[in-house]
Image: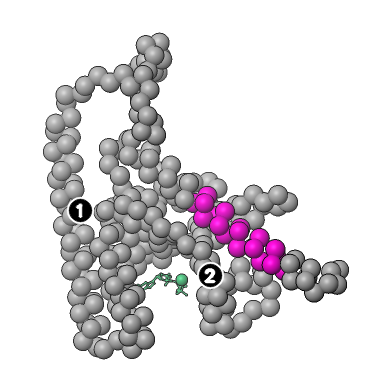
Amino acid sequence: MIDNPIDQMKAMQKKLTRFLMMYKFALQEVETKIDILQEEFQLLHDYNPIEHTKSRLKTPESIMKKLYRKGGINSLENIKDTIKDIAGIRITCSFISDIYRISDMLQSQKDLTTVAVKDYIKNPKPNGYKSLHLLVEVPVFMSDRVEPVCVEIQIRTIAMDFWASLEHKIFYKCNESVPDELLKDLKLAADTAYELDQKMEQLHREVNQIKLAHHSETNFINELLINNEKFKIPDHLLKLALEEGK
Ligand code: GTP
Ligand code: MG
């Protein structure tokens, strides 16, 4: 039992910091997973499926706002159960097929549990919003326990992201009462963005076909590139790798 009010405040502050830190660690884990997938994918397929990623932790203030919207709280555990997007990560891809590829690769990892999937690409929101939302749980290894922590992952194309950020700004500026005409135009813009996504995907497939056709001239490479650093492959290691590949 802590009697001194200052000590009490300090203990409470530590408890809250530790609570939010758990989400920071969970984000870092998922970010590392994405970095690995991205780097390995680049090596295997010679292109980068991810344009960029952005992570954010919900601020204590917006956690509280959302809690009140959802009907209040009585414990920290209650926050964990009610607010599933304290840790959020957004992945922007070049092509729609990459969205599903990244989603499958993440979901097939054994230490990651899929809690929910919302596919707003196959089932867009009435306003035109498109994105793939995954709610996953990752185990965070703390000093005294392992805690499963929820992370919301939003995966979308550049065009979908462009649309969503503009729509978000419009709602913010118009205090959520957007004129009907603007709503109609926004929906039209979402449809146009989707057409562009489909066209780009088709072009991407055509480029791949051309690349495949030109792939016959394989040049012999006795170097490795890791972290932008070149390493010469010793002859013996090269021989071993060639033997394995037979
Ligand atoms: P929240 O309570 O807002 O988190 O919604 P939810 O629990 O029903 O989840 P949902 O998957 O629908 O949305 C989660 C997040 O997706 C939001 O916080 C936004 O970041 C994003 N999002 C969902 N719908 C829209 C939309 O219509 N426009 C934009 N710009 N973003 C959206
Ligand atoms: Mg949210």
Q: Residue at x 48, y 46 (%)?
A: 32
For the residues carrying marks 2 and 1, which lies nearer the camera in this image?
2
Residue 221: quadrant of the picture: top left
Q: Residues within 10 Å of mark 2 (few under 14, many from 20)?
A: few
Tell me the CA gap for discs 2 and 1: 37 Å
Q: Is residue 14 magenta?
A: yes
Please tell me whether residue 228 is drawn above or below residue 114 in the rendered image.
above
Residue with the mark numbered 2: 59
Q: Are the residues tagged 2 and 1 within 8 Å (C-beta)?
A: no
Query: Where is residue 74 drawn, in percent x and y?
Result: 68, 78
**What is the quadrant of the C terminus in the image?**
top left
Disc 1, SS:
helix
Please tell me whether residue 113 is drawn above or below residue 223 in the rendered image.
below
Disc 2, SS:
loop
Q: Amino acid at mark 1?
A: Glu
**What is the quadrant of the N terminus in the image?**
bottom right
Q: Residue at x 16, y 24 (%)?
A: 217
